[in-house]
Image (tube, coloured by chain):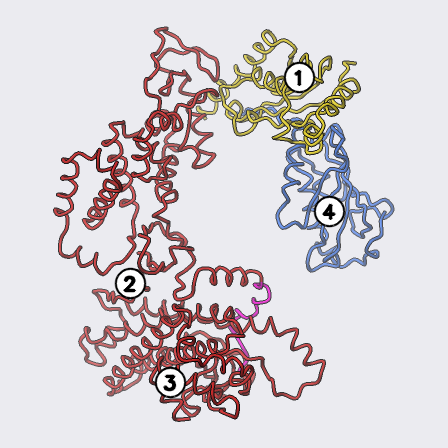
Chain colours: A blue, B yellow, C red
Amino acid sequence: MSFSFPSVPRNFRLLEELERGEKGIGDGTVSYGMDDGDDIYMRSWTGTIIGPHNSVHEGRIYQLKLFCDKDYPEKPPSVRFHSRVNMTCVNHETGVVEPKKFGILANWQREYTMEDILTQLKKEMAAPHNRKLVQPPEGTYF
Amino acid sequence: MVFIVRYVVRLKPKPVGDFLLCVGTAPGISASPSEENMRYFNVMILGPSQSPYEGGVFKLELFLPEEYPMAAPKVRFLTKIYHPNIDKLGRICLDILKDKWSPALQIRTVLLSIQALLSAPNPDDPLSENVAKHWKTNEAEAVETAKEWTQLYASGT
Amino acid sequence: MDSEDDMHDANSVDDDYYSGDTAADYCSDDDCGDYEFMDHDFEDPHDIVAKHQQKNYVVLNEADICQRQEDDITTVSTVLSIPRVAASILLCHYHWSVSNVHEAWFADEDRIRKTVGLLERPVQFSIAKLLTCGICFESYPLDRISTAACGHPFCSTCWKSYMRTSIDGGPGCLMLRCPDPSCSAAVGQDMISRLASDDDKGKYARYLLRSYIEDNRKTKWCPAPGCEYAVEFVVGGGGYDVACSCSYGFCWNCTEEAHRPVDCSTVAKWIMKNSAESENMNWILANSKPCPKCKRPIEKNQGCMHMTCTPPCKFEFCWLCLGAWTDHGERTGGFYACNRYEAAKQEGAYDETERRREMAKNSLERYTHYYERWATNQSSRQKALADLHQMQNVHLCNSLSLSLSLSLSLSPQLEKLSDRQSQPESQLKFIIEAWLQIVECRRVLKWTYAYGYYLSEDEHAKRQFFEYLQGEAEAGLERLHQCAEKDLQNYLTAEPPPNDFNDFRTKLAGLTSVTRNYFENLVRALENGLSDVDTQGGCSKTAASSKGGAGGKGKSGRGKAASKTGGPNDDSQRQIANLFLFASPLGWLLLQKL
């Protein structure tokens, strides 16, 4: 038998993500929160990634901006780095994470969350093609 | 498998029944299911008379999660409101939505409880610290602010 | 269920019966008589012996637990004349204390009924043919509707999912109430059995059993992973160390592993400290160190600290301090001082920066010293435990009580030994005894290092006394462990079999008994807070004033502290020697020799 249960609507889904983010995730190397506490539609978010071990990113703190539009989570949020970073999937001019070059955005499913995006990005930093790239100085922004 | 089928079938009448119940019997409250998601309701609550919210029309959204009626519905205000038990994102601090939930409660009773909460704010169990503090230190002034906000955001346009 | 537990059970019921005047009032003579009668009926000589040897705790298996729970429910149900399910709900609310239930009930029955949700008069059902379920609002014939004592009707499907939600939510399901939001009627196990799914019934029963152990002040689960025994502890008299039937020894008070003679708060501090320092300490846990002479890596795969590098080097050294083993031996007066922490290399020719660096490292180094000895004794104990089990040919033994639990069938090892040495099997008990002693001593020794770490540096006399006792005990244990581990191999493998087995027996049995004495001294001294130091004459003043004297002066502290008597330290030396006299005659003799 197949029966698909009506899915959680956007706002309640974002509230769930907000609560999870407020509780703190895993080892704390990935975190996120709302930018504007007054925005009832919860569109703008800031994510933080602490660079993974065994990579040039180790110990560095990266800030990202995520924007969840009306069609989230049917469509992925737009994601861009605020802190300057040199990664193959990130546009060098704008800091935008290019969906075509980043699997989780390219093959988005509504079950994916902002936490998943940040965790994947952290993994991506430690991937062979990224872990040794020369990085811009710390504390510079797009 | 058989069990799941029965569960689903058993569950269906509840929201519909709820819906019918709330249309007819509760003054100042309306709820209509959204077209694409029968578990998602657009809710309207009128500010109770003799409260700072009188004259206001408050929009809420309500969702019945998969576990409903064993788990509480999820409800929040979409209209901005100045109330010690409601935060900036419209989240509501109400016991029956949390640990005091009972499957014998219905959408109608939930919405009536929310309406009652507007008449009787409880600053001792706050969700919004600042508002609660305002309420406790200077209730008259807080009530004024609540009235202003009602004018500003809930005047039913 | 064996009779000992029955007996105990009856006792505990009796305790509750007589625990106060009110209790005695409602205990009819017949009832009491029954219990007393049962008591005698079940007692047999074996149990009496077991009871007197033992101790302030009882290990319970699942059957015992169920039986006790059933018995408690029966008691309450009989005394209060209420159904068993109601008795169970009451007991659950009162943390399974029969006497508290009785007390509360007879003080104010109405109030208790209200709080717990036991309605007195069941509401009469309507006589309608159909009833509407209060959750799904559908109408059902009566046989599809169930109610708690309150009469609020819900259909069996809604009941089932209501129960599932509650049971999935955890042990709170034991306090389940009617789904009606304004109703507090209790929903007990009878309704669960009738309406919940089989899976949920099982989970509920499990929570009920767990509650009997976890909510009861007198019982706890054995904390060993995978162990399903519980331990009932009778507070008052005796220490907290208990030995579970799974062979794990733990402290009933703090549920850490058994740590006598060190107190719970020291253990808690130490464990906290270890987790904070764990990253720094990881390297220590590595099982290999370079040989201090030839620098080849040496793996420690045996229990005792006496290491011998592989040929051709064959250097013999101490695993802990990496010094030559000969320094620990008889030539230095048998003084084993590897247990003593002293700021290393104090006399060395260091330049200033090096010294500053050393000082910064010092606190970590001090901790490292104690941690390493704590951890190494732990792994030595594990190894010894494995060896013991191999000897015993069983996996369950009472490692804590040191009561000899020799299995009926000999292990292959001992059988072989019995053959080779033509020894009757009964004559080999001394080997098991030695291993039991080693296991227990490793445990005590390990915890004395946590004790040592927190023993104030300023209490000079106490510290010296402690380190002396610990050193003696440790040296004795090393000799014993080496004898049991290495010497024994000779008799198992050498060809032709050595013919001095009786010497070996004398040696091992002797070492076992000497080591036992050392450890008894150590345990006793720590348990009374090393107070002998304070009471043995007004010595501590002098001792304390000679700060950095006796202890700090000795180079690397390898056993020469006491021999370096000089000028101002003479007094304290003598005082400490006096202490040793009381603590251990052997220690005194050694001092005389130096």
Chain ID for label 1? Answer: B
Of residue C243 and residue A21, the one placed in the foreground of this image is C243
Mark pair 3, 2: CA separation:
38 Å
Name the residue at 23% across, 45% down.
Answer: C9
Q: Position of residue C320 (x, y in %)?
A: 49, 78
Mark 2 sits on what residue? C394
What residue range appears in magenta? C277-291
Q: Which residue is mark 1?
A: B43
Rendered image: mark on residue C442: none
Image: B28 above or below A134: above
Tag 2: amino acid: Val
Q: Are circles 1 and 3 on residues that touch, CB within 8 Å?
A: no
Q: Chain of mark 2?
A: C
Mark 1 or mark 3, whichever is nearer to me:
3
Query: Taking A26 as reference, is C273 above or below it?
Result: below
Q: Amino acid at mark 4?
A: Thr
The foreground one among C45 and C533 is C533
What is the spatial separation of the Cα atoms under label 2 and label 1, in whole angstroms? 70 Å
Count of number-bearing discs: 4
Q: Is residue C314 visible?
A: no
Which of the two marks, 3 or 2, is nearer to us in this view? 3
Q: CA distance from mark 1 to mark 4?
A: 36 Å
* Residue type at tag 3: Gly
What residue is shown with label 4?
A: A48
Are both tags, 1 and 3, on one chain? no
The residue most toward the right is A93
| Residue C394 lies in the magenta-colored region | no
The residue that disc 3 covers is C587
